[in-house]
């Protein structure tokens, strides 16, 4: 059973930066796709970025965040990060980390491929 705990959310002005962390436990091997999702009020939960567990060379991004957000993992700490730069008000949402078996290239942005979720951390960007 994979357990995920997010931290690092907060309030920031537009143009600012935040780094989210997701501490993980319970991985049985390296064959996991780990991802960040977000959900704004009244909107569907959407995939933001994903990375293959223990292989930071395989990363995927939503078009809306590409070039501004960076997903990375500290394998020694079993912690996933999301560095968010040049934040915009439309980035305001609850951010969740998620984990699921298999390669990320298979539907990384689909909620249904992730059985394990954290509790979420709020990010608020003011204009």
Image (tube, rainbow, N blue to C red):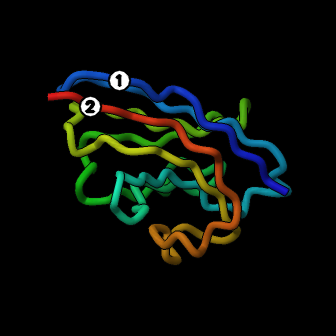
Label count reads 2
**Within the image, what quadrant is residue 47 found in?**
bottom left
- Identified at 79% across, 53% down, the residue is 2
Q: Which residue is mark 2?
A: 125
* Quarter of the N terminus within the rendering: bottom right
Query: Is residue 93 or residue 69 the one in the foreground?
Result: 93
Image height of 95 relative to 61, above or below: above
Q: Quadrant of the C terminus?
A: top left
Q: Can you give x and y, in whole percent of width and height, for residue 82 in the image?
A: 46, 38
Q: Residue at x 41, y 54 (%)?
A: 39
Q: At 23% across and 54% down in the image, what residue appears?
A: 64
**Foreground of the two, 55 or 94:** 94
Q: Secondary structure at mark 1?
A: strand
Find out whether the residues at labels 1 and 2 contact each other: C-beta distance under 8 Å.
yes
User: Does 11 sit left or right of 3 as displayed?
Assistant: left
Q: Position of residue 70 (x, y in %)?
A: 38, 40
Q: Position of residue 111 (x, y in %)?
A: 53, 69
Residue nearest the viewer, comparing 70 with 43: 43
Q: Which mark is residue 117?
A: none
Q: Nearer the viewer, residue 110 or 69?
A: 110
Q: CA distance from mark 1 to mark 2?
A: 6 Å
Name the residue furthest front. Answer: 42
Left or right: 53, with 70 as reference point: right
Residue at figure coordinates x 35%, y 53% from the top left: 41
Image mark for residue 11: 1
- Judged from the image, the secondary structure of the residue bearing numbered disc 2 is strand
Q: Is residue 127 above or below residue 41?
A: above
Sequence-earlier tag: 1 or 2 = 1
Q: How far across and down, in percent of the image, does residue 80 sit? A: 59, 39
């Amino acid at each position: 059973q994979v357990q995920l705990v997010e931290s690092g959310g907060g309030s920031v002005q537009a143009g600012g930066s935040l780094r989210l962390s997701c501490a993980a436990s319970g991985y049985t091997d390296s064959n996991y796709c780990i991802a960040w999702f977000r959900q704004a009020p009244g909107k569907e939960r959407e995939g933001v970025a994903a990375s293959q567990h223990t292989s930071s060379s395989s990363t995927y991004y939503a078009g809306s965040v590409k070039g501004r957000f960076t997903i990375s993992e500290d394998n020694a700490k079993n912690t996933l990060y999301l560095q968010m730069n040049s934040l915009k008000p439309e980035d305001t949402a609850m951010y969740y980390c998620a984990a699921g078996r298999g390669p990320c290239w298979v539907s990384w942005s689909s909620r249904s491929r992730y059985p394990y979720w954290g509790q979420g951390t709020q990010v608020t960007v003011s204009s």
